[in-house]
Image: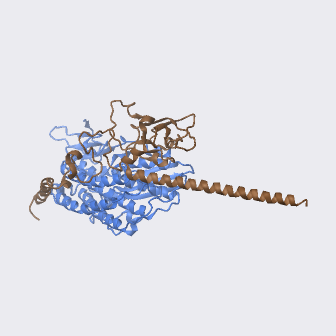
Amino acid sequence: MSNATATAPNYELIQRDGLDTGLLEISMGPHHPSTHGVFRMDVKLDGETVVDLQPVFGYLHRNHEKLAENMSYLSSMPFTDRLDYFNSMTNNWAYALAAEQLIEIEIPERAEYLRVIMSELTRLVNHVSLVGFFVNDLGALGTPLLYAFREREKILDLFEQASGARMMCNYFRFGGLRNDVPEGWLDRAREVVDRFPKFLDEYEKLLCENEIILSRTQGVGNLSKELAISAGITGPMLRASGESYDIRKVDRYGIYDRFQFRVPYSEGDVGDCYDRFMVRMLEMRESIGILKQALDGIEDGPVLGNAPKVFKPKPAEAYGRIEAPKGELGFYLIADGTPKPYRFRVRPPSFINLTVLRDMCLGQKVADAVIILGSIDIVLGEVDR
Amino acid sequence: MSLLGGGILKGMAVTLRNFVGSYFDRDRLTTNDYAWRAGDSLPQHAGEYPKEEGEQLRDTTTVNNYSRNFPMLLHDEGEPMDSIRCVACQICERECPPQCIYIEKSEDKKERGGNKAQFYPAKFDIDVSVCMSCQICVEVCPFDAIVMNSQFELSTPDRFGGLLLRRDDLLKSNGYYHKIHPEEAAARDQRMAEEKAAKEAKKKAAAEAAKKKAEENAKAEAEAGNEKQEDPQ
């Protein structure tokens, strides 16, 4: 900590009664419990008010893109699990979508249904634990987070039974899925999905009317629609700022055109932490609706199309994107006719959503900077890659 | 709703219901007991740690049938090295994303299980401190020689040597595979049998076609010979 000079914009140093009331510079992180990983915020404070904030990241850089350019297309599939390690299934899907554009493969019907089921279960996992972490940042230590993790565990068990691993699933393949789900899996999934709304009712009762949460989140960390759009924000954060934009509706990738669901978004132009929190709560309800339709519509059949043994696409470029739980997740591939991609680029939602952190935090209290960061929903594995 | 703090009280009612409910409904518990202590009252969850007290963990079969941990090498019945399926083709070594497999091909060929003589791995090491359990090696293997084990009690005081599994540590029988992943093993055996049958049928058909062709050739030759013989007359 040091007394910094007043370099922050629009700030005038207050001199009062001969006291030195200079800015206080605090380095929050990289191991601060509120930063969800190894992330650092250089905060300049006037008393308790944030007057400047510099995000510092890169502590978890693992060279994902260059690694992928030096191995075969299939071999980098397990590495996509480790981007956003909460949502390995959706990461797999985005990469598979991009690769499937490079080469003509027909995806079997059952695989399409299972992809939707897995991806919506992932959305439930992500949102339910994000809400838990978010109220954890607010100071509700433990209880809501543990309830969320209890429910998350049931879904992770389903993932383990289908793919062999709870989190690093590595389940999607170019042209379908690695293997079919075991016998009785769909019934177990139906049971979990049927029970989930009951838990959500309870969760909403626990959190949504709580006066402390309301006063801590309403009007905190506002993000206007204009700024959100011009900064390229996607996902629940953009919808909380008042723009109804969902790639499941825009692109209708996979078989999302077959399902009835609504896209929750905030009607006002506030975009505060409460909006972001509520949009996720409402999205879980819609995910359950999609899951019920998909579990009813799924039929028997193969799960893997006739993908070529050696994946060697002709020179071309492809961009596959999906609505991941955190926003638009895209994979950009350039093929040069060899079994390795010439260029492999990830468009990570949490990294781009993080860019507006400073704008949202300026003028807020330092304790609120923690919950604003929490409401963005970042995973550092994806930010740093 | 005007009572200040009403929302908080409502939320507290939820926590109270969960606390009291956890004594009657295990689904409300945020933690699971050890399976051997909880007995049958545990919900049918995956990944149950030792089912019985004092169970030998090194050969545990109690993790669920689908979980995967690190690879192992399969051999059929008999002496491991006489029936090892691996032919040291090194595809898995090339495809392994974190590059944790090291193979040295044998210099001589060895006959296994009535098949024609093949190379075998003189060295086959997997560094499980690097392995990320992704199962790519299993998928690329054309000989069904490498599959995933579910053994997870691998902690050792030796950080380097203890976590470097050698060929003989990795060798497991097909029977063991059936024990830990029954469905997957049965499906794999069935597919292998089908492939073998198809191969043999193809071989048989090819042999028959060759025989037929040879017969026809012989016949044609004989006829030609007859014609030749007839010619001078």
Task: Report which colour depicts chain B.
Answer: brown
Corner quadrant of residue A4:
top left
Give residue A185's position: percent from left, percent from top. 33, 59
Give residue B218's position: percent from left, percent from top. 75, 56
Give residue B204's position: percent from left, percent from top. 61, 55
The single residue placed furthest to the right in the displayed view is: B233
Corner quadrant of residue A18:
top left
What colour scheme was applied to this rendering of the protein? by chain
Left/right of residue B23 with respect to residue A377 in the rendered view? left
Give residue B82's position: percent from left, percent from top. 50, 38
Q: Quadrant of the N terminus of chain B?
A: bottom left
Seen from the viewer's position, the closer of residues A353 and A69 is: A69
Q: Is residue A335 above or below residue B90?
A: below
Q: Quadrant of the C terminus of chain B?
A: bottom right
Left/right of residue B62 with respect to residue A332 in the rendered view? left
Residue A175 visible within the image: yes
Task: Report which colour depicts chain A.
Answer: blue
Q: Is residue B126 above or below residue A256?
A: above
Q: Is residue B211 above or below residue A286?
A: above
